[in-house]
Amino acid sequence: MKHRLNIACQTSALSELRTFLQRSMVGVSLSEIEKHQVTLAVEEVCANLIIHSHDCNPQDYIRLEIKDSAQKLIFEISDQGEAFNILNYEAPDLKKVMVEKRKGGLGIILVKKIMDEIEFESENGTNTCRLIKWFRS
């Protein structure tokens, strides 16, 4: 089964994204907690793209495609903004973040902890971040 959604690159579109994700995961072999975690991870990647790659430009959009099989869910997030390779992300020193009382910069850590696999590719101006969550038996 496949589900697709195009969202405008504005933060107000994130509520539409959450609703779409929740509806798309009905009947999927994940616990409610896992569904919420996956929603958080996908939303974090999309929010980062909207804010940092597209400067909240509502003329731009992000495409999300969800593919599921008996073993896993695959979330493909594609855009034509400035490329950010999540695989090259280096986590900040958490102690330093706490001392500085800095907000932000920790969402990618959550994405990496929640998702089982992360893939990134950029081809012909289109960037795709693939988040994969395996079903547990």
Image (cartoon, helix red, strand yellow):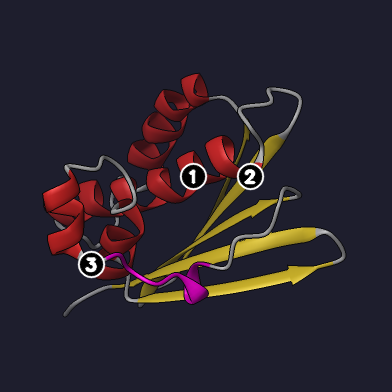
Side (left or right) of 84 relative to 60: left
Q: Which amino acid does label 1 sit on?
A: Asn
Q: Is the Cβ of the residue at disc 1 closer than 8 Å to that at disc 2? A: yes
**Does residue 95 lie above or below 49 as drawn?**
below
Residue 1: x percent and y percent? 52, 58
1 or 3: tag closer to the N-terminus:
1
| Residue hosting label 2 | 53
**Number of marks in the image?**
3
The amino acid on which the numbered mark 3 sits, given as a three-letter code, is: Asp
Among the two numbered marks 1 and 2 on one chain, the one whose residue lies closer to the N terminus = 1
Q: Residues within 10 Å of mark 1 (few under 14, many from 20)?
A: some
Which residue lies under the disc numbered 3?
93
CA gap, disc 2 to disc 3? 24 Å
Q: Which mark is residue 16?
A: none
The image shows residue 98 at horizontal and vertical percentages of 13, 51
134 magenta-colored: no
Question: Residue 87 magenta-drawn?
Answer: yes
Q: Position of residue 86 (x, y in %)?
A: 49, 67
- Marks 1 and 2 sit apart, C-alpha to C-alpha, by 7 Å
Q: Quadrant of residue 62?
A: top right
